[in-house]
Image (tube, grey):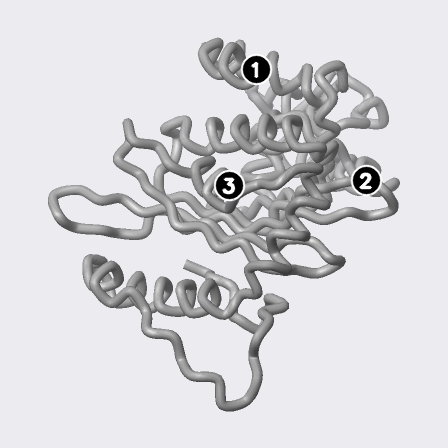
Amino acid sequence: MSLKSPEQFNIANKAEGQASVELDSDFIATFSKVEDRRCFEVFLDMEERENKEERKERMARLFDREVASREINDLFVFPDRKIDSRTLVASGHKHGIETVAILFTDQEGKREICGEMDFSFYEDEGKKILYIDAQELKEQKTGLGLEIECRLEKFCRDNSISTIYTRATSSSDKKFIGAYVHALHGYEFEWPGESSSLQSELNEYLAKRGIKIDTEIESLQRPIDFAVLKGRNREGRIVEVGKEFLTASNLNWEGRRDLAFDSPGTQDFIRYLEGKGRNDLIEKYF
C-alpha cells in the first residue's frame, strides 16, 4: 500500500511535546501482515491528531450540509464481499478535505488490506471538485471498482460536487490500465493538446504493427473515441486496437468528468454499464 505520510496532510495540534496517542492495538493486531499493521498504525495516528472541529466546518462548507465521516467511509463498505473500510478524513489543501480509505477483508479471523483510495474534495474558482489521487484494488475484474465509481459519483451529485478529476495512467506491462478504463467511464481530456498527443502516439503504434483503421486519426477527439476504435491487422482480422493501445502503452492524461446527467461523459458511462449488463448499478445510482 502507498499510504500518504502525515506530512502530506495539514494535521492540526502538532505542538512540540504533544503526548503520543495510544493506538487501537487490538484492532491492528488482527492484521496478518506486518506491512498492513504498520499502515494502520500510521493511519490511526494521523486520525487522532486531526482537528475535528476544523474538519467538521470544512465539510459543511464543501457539501452544503453537515456530512459525517461515516458517510464517506460507507462508500467503501461491501458486506456481500466481506469488505470493510476505515477512512481518514483530514483538513487538506485549498481549505478542502484530504481523504484516505483503507479497504480490508475480515474472513475466518484474518484481516488483510485489499485496497486503498486516496482522494480530496475542494473548491476551485467556485467549482466544487473531487480529485481522485490514487486507487489500488487487489480485486480485479470483479466489478468492485465499477461500483466504487458509481457510489462516488452519486455521493458527489447528492452533495454539491459537480466534477471529478483524476490522472488516467496506463503502463506497457498492463499493471495500470487507467487510460482505457477512464475513457470507458466517460472521462474527458482536461487539457488542450492531449488528444493531439494521443493521436501521434496511436499513429506510431499502428505503423509498427501494420494495423489499418477506417477512421481519420484527427477525428479522434475524446478518450472514448480512442477506446472503442477497431482496425484490421496484417492478416485482415478485426482487432480492438483502441483497447490494446490504451492498455499496453505508457500513457498519461488528465481526466475530467462532468457529473450532470445529460453530459456526454455521464451518458457514455451509462452506455458502458448497459453493455456490461450492469443495469442494477444504473437503477441504484442513476
The residue carrying pointer 3 sits among few (fewer than 14), some (14 to 19) or many (20 or more) residues within 10 Å by Cα, namely: many
Q: Which residue is mark 2?
A: 127
| Amino acid on which disc 1 is placed | Ile
Residue placed under numbered mark 3 in the picture: 72
Q: Amino acid at mark 3?
A: Ile
Question: Looking at the image, which residue is at 56% across and 33% down?
Answer: 152
Find disc 1 in the rendering and name its residue. 238
Residue at image point 46% right, 43% down: 70
Could you tell me which secondary element the residue under label 3 belongs to? Answer: helix
Residue sitting nearer the eye, 184 or 257: 257
40 w.r.t. 77: above or below = below
Q: Vertical placement of 171 versus 227: above or below?
A: below
Give the CA distance from mark 1 to mark 2: 43 Å
> Could you say where residue 10 lies in the image, as x and y percent from the top left?
63, 68
Which element is circle 2 on?
strand
Tell me: residue 9, above or below residue 174. Answer: below
Q: Is residue 209 above or below residue 111?
A: above
Q: Earlier in the sequence, mark 2 or mark 3?
A: 3
From the viewer's side, name the closer residue of 211 and 239: 239
Q: Is residue 118 among what the camera can see?
A: yes
> Whole-percent x and y of residue 195?
80, 36
Q: Nearer the viewer, mark 3 or mark 1?
A: 3
Location of the N terminus by quadrant is bottom left
Q: Position of residue 124 (x, y in %)?
A: 82, 48
- Which residue is at the front of the view, 79 or 221? 79
Q: CA distance from mark 2 to mark 3?
A: 20 Å
